Amino acid sequence: MQDFQKNSNIFNLLSEGVSEGIIVVNSEQKIVATNSSSEQMFGYMKDELIGKPLDILIPKRYHSGHDAHVDKFIAKSGKRQMGHGRNLYGICKNGKEFPVEAGLNPFEFYGSTYVMALVIDITERKSREEELSHWARIFDESLNEIYIFDAETFKFLNVNKEAQRNIGYSMDEMTSMTPVDIKPDIDDLYFKELIAPLINSDTGKVKFETTHARKDGSTYPVEVHLQLSNLGENRVCVAFILDITERRDYTENLENIVEERTHQLTEALAVEKELNELKTRFLSLVSHEFKTPLSSILTSITLLGKYTETDQQPKRDKHVTTIKNKVKYLDTILNDFLSVERLESGKVNYKIEEFPLSKTVNEVVYNCNMLLKSGQKIHYPENIDEVNIRFDEKTLELALSNLIHNAIKYSPEDSTIDIIVEIRDKDYAIKVIDEGIGIPEEEQKHIFNRYFRAENALLTQGTGIGLNIAKQHIENLGGSLEFSSTEKKGSTFILYLPKLNTN
Ligand code: ADP
């Protein structure tokens, strides 16, 4: 120790210029020299450490291990860094511990062995490292995907575990890729445009939704949050990615439910509206359509009471016919209304059976005869005597009488109504052709709408229901109802009845 102290001037000279702590121990691990950096580091006064065992600078729990370590080290006589792979700690005079890094240099001096320890207080570095590893853990363990790429070349620099897991590429593979390679909907140009606000302004963030394509080709919708950051000298973009598959599924589901409910509601409202409309129509029908026939029935009955003489029989007959016609008319519109109600509520029962076509046509024509205007004629089909058809007889009767009624109503006196039946391979075409007022072309598309009445028909009594229900019933049974018409020339309505199997 004395030998060493003899030459301490040289040591002092050399060691005071060094910012690391220098501690020299002899082979008994007694401190023989220190510099002021180490005294400050450990909180001792000048020379206070000389002659003390090295242990006073080392926390108790490391003592035995430390001795063995240094001994082994001295035996090996190699110059090396201490603390590799483990944490080294020093202890200050006041008991405060701090992390250190120490390099040991053994040397011989006047025949004795010494070790010079170069000690660095790494408290600050350690806490920086801990902080860094904390952030690195957050980065890697984040359940959101995080991608970091160069702001100039767009090449990926780092991609966290969750991103690698979901996208399916390894970090190695990703280093040669750019965000455009995993975004099938975005090309280079568009990507540059997207992040331009970020690159040019250096602040803020960019947010957009797009799709990511995995290595296996599958895709998933994502929300991208991009921010600019600095990594050393380089500007980098940090992308936080949210996989929005669930959110999108949820939203889509919700949208579907809303759409479905809206649809149901609209339908319910439409039915409600239709019913209301029906009620209103019915009321206005009762007040208008019923009033006229009822008052002419009343007039005829009043007059009937006055014609008491025998020779007034023709007059009586005329009024009885009027009454019959008006009652028939009222019966028809009531039946139409009942039919609408039945069609709406789905309570229609069809009865398919075989019957001679001529029977129905005859009956309908017979009933219509009393509505004919003066000079009007109906040409009856001649080719149906032998024809038996299978159909719902009531429906055919309803449809046919509607068509012939209309032909009579909307044609002038002295005109002809032709009924032609074509027997075809798969069906029968029953045509009712008139020479009447026709239907204006622009109104033809509405003619089967319920309550629709063409402008030129408004002076004639009617409800706008007949064609609508006839068409619905006929279609329910697999047939169809079509027409062609020229205003002021006439109309042709055609009933197509399918040939139903006879068995
Ligand atoms: P309505 O005759 O009671 O008004 P329809 O449903 O039978 O009701 O007919 C609807 C509309 O179609 C009529 O108001 C009329 O404008 C037009 N129409 C129907 N048949 C003819 C026809 N043979 N000639 C001209 N117009 C017709």
Image: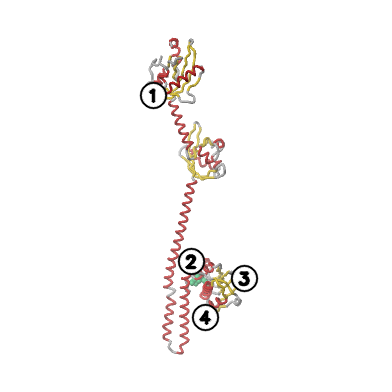
Q: Position of residue 168 (x, y in %)?
A: 55, 40
Camera-side residue of 334 and 231: 334
- 3 or 4: mark nearer the eye: 3
Answer left or right for 96 relative to 107.
left
Whether label 1 lies within 8 Å of ligand 1 gets the answer: no
**What residue is drawn where x is 48% and y is 71%?**
336
Q: Quadrant of residue 218?
A: top right
Which of the two discs, 1 and 4, labels the residue nearer the N terminus? 1
Q: Is residue 466 at all visible to an observer of this figure? A: yes
Q: Which secondary structure, mark 2?
A: loop
Query: Which label belongs to residue 346?
Result: 2
> Which residue is the site of mark 4?
374
**Kind of residue sitting beneath label 3:** Arg
- 1 or 3: mark nearer the eye: 1
Camera-side residue of 356 and 416: 356
Which of the two discs, 1 and 3, labels the residue nearer the N terminus? 1
Query: Which label belongs to residue 424?
Result: 3
Judge whether 14 appears above or below 171 on screen: above
> Which residue is the site of mark 1?
96
Which of the two discs, 3 and 2, labels the residue nearer the N terminus? 2
How far is the residue under mark 1 from the one under mark 3? 112 Å
Camera-side residue of 10 and 62: 62
**Kind of residue sitting beneath label 4:** Ser
**Mark 1 vs 3: CB contact within 8 A:** no
